[in-house]
Image (cartoon, rainbow, N blue to C red):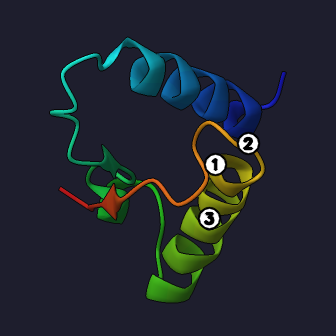
Amino acid sequence: MTPRQLAAALAQYVRGADTTGQLLGFELGNEPNGYLTTVNAYMERIGRYVAALDASPATVGVPITGPA
């Protein structure tokens, strides 16, 4: 399982466990300046995670926040 697939599976689990509807979104990219050197590299990586989330009916369109 790739990191993106794992993230999508975890997001699907979390969204399903949110029985009260209080989940506001998923944060992607905690402190990206520590491991990515350009904004373009960050946006490319985030785009791949968003595509993985959008590939699942359980997480398509989930709000995304970040970076922290």
Question: In the image, what residue type sits under mark 3?
Answer: Arg
Q: Give the foreground label among 1 and 3.
A: 1
Between the C-alphas of marks 2 and 3, the distance is 18 Å
Q: Position of residue 24 (x, y in %)?
A: 20, 46
Question: In the image, what residue type sits under mark 2?
Answer: Ser
Quarter of the C terminus within the rendering: bottom left
The image quadrant of residue 8 is: top right
Q: Give the foreground label among 1 and 2.
A: 2
Q: Marks 2 and 1: in contact by CB < 8 Å? A: yes
Q: Position of residue 47 (x, y in %)?
A: 63, 70
Q: Which residue is mark 3?
A: 45
Q: Marks 3 and 1: in contact by CB < 8 Å? A: no
Between the C-alphas of marks 1 and 3, the distance is 13 Å
Quarter of the N terminus within the rendering: top right
| 51 or 46, nearer to the observer | 51
Marked residue nearer the N-terminal end (1 or 3)? 3
- Which residue shows up at 71% across the image and 61% down it? 51
Q: Position of residue 45 (x, y in %)?
A: 62, 64
34 sits left or right of 50 in the view: left
Q: Position of residue 16 (x, y in %)?
A: 46, 19
Question: In the image, what residue type sits under mark 1?
Answer: Leu
Above or below, comparing residue 8 to residue 13 in the picture: below
- Which residue shows up at 68% across the image and 56% down it? 54
Q: Which residue is mark 2?
A: 56
**Around disc 3, counting alpha carbons within 10 Å, would you say few (fewer than 14), some (14 to 19), or many (20 or more)?**
some
Q: Which residue is mark 1?
A: 53
Q: Give the foreground label among 2 and 3.
A: 2
